[in-house]
Amino acid sequence: MSKKTSLVLMTLLFMLFAAGCWDARDISKGSVVFVAAIDLNQEGGIQFGEPVKYDATILMPNLYPESANKVRIEKVSGTSLSGSRDQRAYINPDIILVRMMRVFLVGESLAASGIAPVIDSLCRNPLIDNSLNMAMTTGRSGELITVQPQDFPELGLYLKVMLNTINEKSFFPVVTLHVFRTQSTTMGRNPVLPILKADNGEVRISGLGIFKKDQLINRIGLDESRPLALLRGCKGRAYIPYVITREGESVDRGTVFASNERKVKVERQGDQYTFTITITLKGDLIEHENRVQLLQESDYLPMVEEQIASKIEDECQAFIERMQGEFKVDCIDINKYALAKWRNELKDSIDGGFIEKVKINVDVKVNIRNTGDLT
Amino acid sequence: MIIGTMLGVNFLALPRIASASSQQDAWIAVITGSFLPLLVLLLIERLGRRFPGQDFIEMSQALFGKVMGSLLAAILGIHMLCVAATVIIRFAYLDTVYLLPETPRSVICLLILLGALYVAGKGARVVARVNELMFYLYLPVLLLFALPLLKAAEYTYLMPVGGSGLGNIARSSWDACLYFGRMEFLMVAYFMVIRKDEVVKAGVSAVTFVALLYMMLTIACLLVVGPENLQNQVLPLIGELKANGFQFVDRTDLLFVAVWSVAFRPVFNMLCMCGFSFTRLLNLPEKRHYFLVLFIIGTAAYLLTFVPRSAVEIVIYTDWYGYTYPVMGLGYPLLYHLAAAVRGRKVPNV
């Protein structure tokens, strides 16, 4: 066989195989999953001789233009999480494609029982993107997934944009599968998850779930989410309103749009560990009701900065007290700094009883860079 | 060519292996592990200097006699054949897991082998040129590993530096040095080089490049995934790429795998060296019989890829095979040096 003939044969062979004789997928014959929601099963039942444990609900945009519904929502149950997919064979003729999944929701009861099995199931699938956003829901996530937001093509896009960009408008953590997985399995660290709630036909974020490793132990509202995000060092930009009062009366009311930064210092004297968290807020004054001209009154701006710093500091101190007294887990992610210095000494105690005993100081610095007076 | 031979798929697992004992100090273990290939390089270069104008087969037969020398050369040839098979199967494993889950592994292995045979069949000069070309082509691809650092790096995962203890770092260094293997191909390749005075300089540069690359990849992986989580991932560097999506490339992991899946340089490098060894060993004319010998070697390597039945077996078997690298890489040149020392100046010309 001449070299040319062998080259042509080899090229043909490559083309034949590289085209994907086995792995070719027609996108029009697939159901693309955008959102998945997992709950603990409540109805009970037996499948293949074993009790049913999980309910898995998925949301897929409808690719058939003639169809009346924008999305298709399917719920199946199974004895194991991935095992429940078997049931989809009986209700969906299409191939289920998970590569484009954007958001993963966990029901409240499942979160309380621990979501390590869910994480395991997700991470074993190489097709699933670790940057997908995660959240938990009040009540059952399978019910929340049925809400169709107005003015959005489907819930998946709505949730993805909201959960992924929330830190551009508020101090709030963005939690992806990668973030949750690493934080729930790393010594000294604990994750948080945004809580979603269905409210009058809309889905909104209502707070944060506090986790001890993979298990939900408490929940906080939006007011406490801000100090948590700042203490935790979740970078973002947010609107910080302030009110200046003199002799019990409000004399100014305004807003600063600021970004945040956190620095943590840890010191040790014997068995006493002291953390000093410095939060720096840098931003612009975007609202200021009082008619004081900031360019003329040079003392006024430092006063506003002081007011905001003091308010945030109080919020943070109150949150730290609650964390040490009630949650008893490091949900502000500072243990890692102690481990960075004394890993060998602390590895046995860091996840049990350490955070309650440490002293945590908070120092907030506010720097208003632009007052808007010149615009 | 040294870089091309060392960089296969196994480096994707290196952070896991290196951090198993030394945890946050895995990157130190990787650097210290790179002393093995440097030592192998120097030993082979010194050996080559003793036998100017001869090739590996001639040197073997001169030192150990015709039968024993041929046997030793054949063992090294079979070792390189097995190395080619392990690399083929690791590439096939990567493709099966991430890109072509339904395509039979035997088909993927065959495709890799055909591509490698085509390059190796063109001879050592072409193999060296393809290695050079691919080095520059693939350099930007390695930068993908830096992208997750922009969003997900956690510097405390590297601290305290040296905190895992000397014993653990030493243990991990040994594990890591197995990932710097395949330098033994120089036993054959060295004698093909025309400008032998540049071998040490080029070799040290290549090993330093690979060591620094491995160190940086290990640091990147530690920063993003953390030493504890590394142990749960077979290929943690792919896990590192999966950590974040970017607007311009949503799945950097799949992009990397798609591009890297054809970077099977160690396969054609090893097949080429193996082919030349056996052609010379059987005393066949190179021009007429080299490709035939190569084809037989390729077939044998292909058959070996059927041995592991599952992904777990692939990882276990190829990890086991890693232990042969220090044995062959250090053992062969040391044995030859010893034989040369014993024989002194009585080495006959073949």
Image (cartoon, helix red, strand yellow):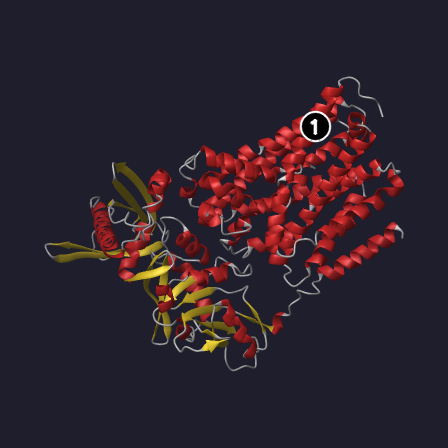
Q: Chain of mark 1?
A: B
Q: Can residue A251 be seen at all in this image of the molecule?
A: yes
The secondary element bearing badge 1 is classed as helix
Question: Whole-percent x and y of residue A281?
Answer: 31, 48
Tell me: residue A159, above or below residue B329.
below
Side of B148 where B315 appears, left or right: right
Side of A269 where B225 appears, left or right: right
Question: Whole-percent x and y of residue A219?
Answer: 30, 62
In the image, farthest residue toward the front: B67
| Residue located 74% across and 55% down the image | B110
Q: Give the quarter of the image for residue A336.
A: top left
| Residue located 78% across and 44% down the image | B120
Question: Whole-percent x and y of residue A199?
Answer: 33, 73
Tell me: residue A333, above or below residue B96.
above
| Residue located 55% across and 63% down the image | A99
Mark 1 surroundings: few (<14), some (14-19) or many (≥20) residues within 10 A? few
A338 or A198, which is in the foreground?
A338
In the image, farthest residue toward the top: B345
Pointer 1 residue: B335
| Residue located 66% across and 41% down the image | B136
Q: Can residue A287 be seen at all in this image of the molecule?
A: no
In the image, farthest residue toward the left: A247
What kind of residue is marked 1?
Leu
Question: Whole-percent x and y of residue B312?
Answer: 59, 54
Tell me: residue B230, above or below residue B77.
below
A305 or A187, which is in the foreground?
A187
Counting labels gives 1
B204 or A241, which is in the foreground?
B204
